[in-house]
Image (cartoon, rainbow, N blue to C red):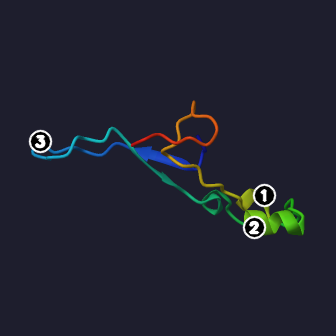
Amino acid sequence: MSEHRKSWKPVAGKNDPCPPLKSKTYETPPNLYLGFQEPGLKQYKPAEALKKGTLWPALFGPYESPFRSADSAGGKEDSR
C-alpha cells in the first residue's frame, strides 16, 4: 500500500441499516509532503513526464485502487 493512502475507521450507529464498514481509505497528493520545490530536483525525460503527468518524480503519485487485493494477479479485482 502506498504511503500516500491513509485510512480511518468510521463510527457505526446502532440504528444504521447498513452493515458497518471496518475502514475507509483516501489518497493524499505527494505535494503535501514537499515543503518547497528545491532547485535541481531529479526530472523525468520529456516523453516519460507526459505519461506520468509531472516532470518531477518527487511529485508523482500513482493511484492505487483500494479494491484490488494484494494477492490478486493479472489485473483481477475483488468483487465488492
Is 6 on the left-hand or right-hand side of 10?
right
- State if disc 1 and disc 2 touch (CB < 8 Å): yes
Name the residue carrying label 3: 14
User: Please, what secondary structure does the residue beneath circle 2 have?
Assistant: loop
Q: Which residue sits furthest top? A: 71
- 32 and 79: which one is in front? 79
Circle nearer the N terminus (1, 3): 3
Mark 1 to mark 3 CA distance (whole Å): 46 Å
Picture layout, residue 19 above or below residue 28: above
Name the residue carrying label 2: 54
User: Please, what secondary structure does the residue beneath circle 3 have?
Assistant: loop
Is 47 on the left-hand or right-hand side of 79?
right
Residue 11 visible in the picture: yes
Tell me the quarter of the image containing the C terminus. top left
- State if disc 3 and disc 2 touch (CB < 8 Å): no
Q: Residue at x 34, y 42 (%)?
A: 9
The amino acid at mark 3 is Lys
Tell me the quarter of the image containing the N terminus. top right
The amino acid at mark 2 is Thr
User: Please, what secondary structure does the residue beneath circle 1 have?
Assistant: helix
How many neighbours does mark 2 have within 10 angstroms: few (below 14), some (14-19), or many (20 or more)? some
Circle nearer the N terminus (2, 3): 3
Name the residue carrying label 1: 57
Is 79 on the left-hand or right-hand side of 35?
left
Q: Residue at x 84, y 63 (%)?
A: 48
The amino acid at mark 1 is Pro
**Residue 57 locus on image (x, y percent):** 78, 58
